[in-house]
Structures are given as C-alpha cells and as structure tokens.
Amino acid sequence: MSTHIRWLGHSAIVIVTSGKTVLIDPFITGNPAATVSADEVAADFILVSHGHGDHIGDTIEIAKRTGATVVTNFEISQWLLGQGLENVHGLQHGGGVDLPFGRVKLTLAFHGSVLPDGTYGGNPAGFLIRTNDGFTIYDAADTGLFGDMALIGDENVDLAFLPIGDYYTMGPEDALKAVKLVRPKHVVPIHYDTFPPIRQDEKAWAEKVRSETGVDAIVLKPGEGFELKKS
Ligand code: NI
Ligand code: MN
C-alpha cells in the first residue's frame, strides 16, 4: 500500500491511496495555475470543502464523467443531487464516513460557503482523512486561524495542507501559528498566488516554518507531488 500526494494548484489536491483516487476541491477550469485539464483528471471520490467556485470547480463534470462519489456537507450534497449527481455523502462538522480508502471527517473552517448560483451552501469545512495505510492528512481548506486546530493536532497529523494566501483565508503569519497548533510532520502551503490578492512568498514561509517549528514544509509547483512515507 502507498499514499501519493499531488497538488494541482490553488486548493486542488489528488491523493492516491489504497488504489483509489481522491480529488479535493477540483478547481481546474479557470484556474490560472492548473497544469492539467478537467477532462483528464481521474477520481473515485471528490471532496468539496465549501460552495465557492474556486473549490467546487469542476466537481459536477468530473463526477459525471468518472462516476466518482462526492463527499461534502449536507447542503452542497443536496445541491449536487439537483445538478444530476447520484453518488453523494452529505456530512456535517464532526461527522465522518468510512470509505474504501479510509475515513473522511468534516472539520471546522471559518469562511463562507455560498454556491455559484447563489444557493446557500451551509457551513464551510476542512477534512481530516485517515488512510487505510495509516496516514492522517488534514486539509484546512479555506479558513482563518482558530484555536481548536490544537484538537486536530492531537490526532497525530502526518501531513497538513494550510492556506497561506491571506485576503480570503489566513495569511502566512497565522498559517505559521496554525502549524504550531496542528503539529504535523509535513505541511504543504495552498491557496496562494492563483490571483493577485493572494500572492505570497511561499519559499520564505516554508523557511520560517522549518526554522521556527522543525516541521517539514514542502513547497510544490502545480502538478508536482510526492510519496507520503512513514518516518
Ligand atoms: Ni472560499
Ligand atoms: Mn477559496
């Protein structure tokens, strides 16, 4: 068994684990950083953190093409059913679901969640994923800093995805505080540079994370990935 991670730019992440492809927040069409096109990405499961267009992205098209099951909050799951999708899980914060590759739980996120057509999208979420091969992955998605990230830190997080872009989410300084609360083994910055208001110096942030926390900060270029290893 192995777990492979790939970042597609912005908040779009691919996790291949237990032979399943898990696609998170697949904003590909219209994403200036994307190096792939929506009609070529694989998915068995699609995780959608909230309703904003830069997260729900190509979910409908990809789910229809691949037959992937979507995991999201209840309100977005109902909206997706109305868009013609059939396989959806509509969770709420603190709730999780056991899937063939592991368990997905919805975590808190402080942000908005309206859907592209103005429909109420419920509350935004992050994801805590436990893979069958023993990795714990936290994707904070779009959020500001909050103290209860320390509770997520108690879950022995192997890999965290944290937004550093500022403006719509926490910026570099709060994301550094988030690293100290979540205490992951590895951290990957996301949600930066895609649009002018969220330009950041990700390398400087990663250097600061390493020197202040000792956490392995991994800066990826869109399209790049790595194999998650037990250390
Ligand atoms: Ni958002
Ligand atoms: Mn966003």
Image: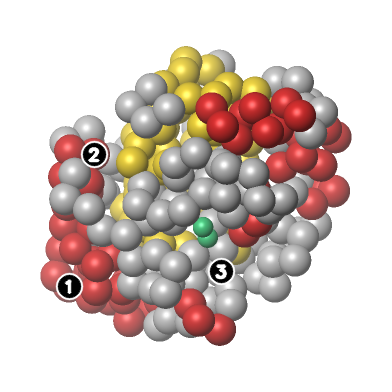
Between 194 and 84, the one nearer to me in the picture: 84
**Secondary structure under badge 1?**
helix
Measured along the vertical axis of the image, is residue 136 above or below residue 99? below
Disc 2 to disc 1, C-alpha distance: 22 Å
**Where does residue 4 sit, x and y in percent of width and height?**
53, 42
Amino acid on which disc 3 is placed: Lys
Can residue 103 be seen in this snapshot? no
Rendered residue at 56%/69% (across/down): 221
**Secondary structure under badge 3?**
loop
**Where does residue 178 sit, x and y in percent of width and height?**
23, 58
Number of other residues with Cα within 10 Å of mark 3, as a class: few under 14, some 14 to 19, many 20 or more: some
Q: How was the colour assigned to the protein in this rendering?
A: secondary structure
Residue 207 appears left or right of 92? left
* Mark sitting on residue 70: none
Between 34 and 145, the one nearer to me in the picture: 145
* Mark sitting on residue 221: 3
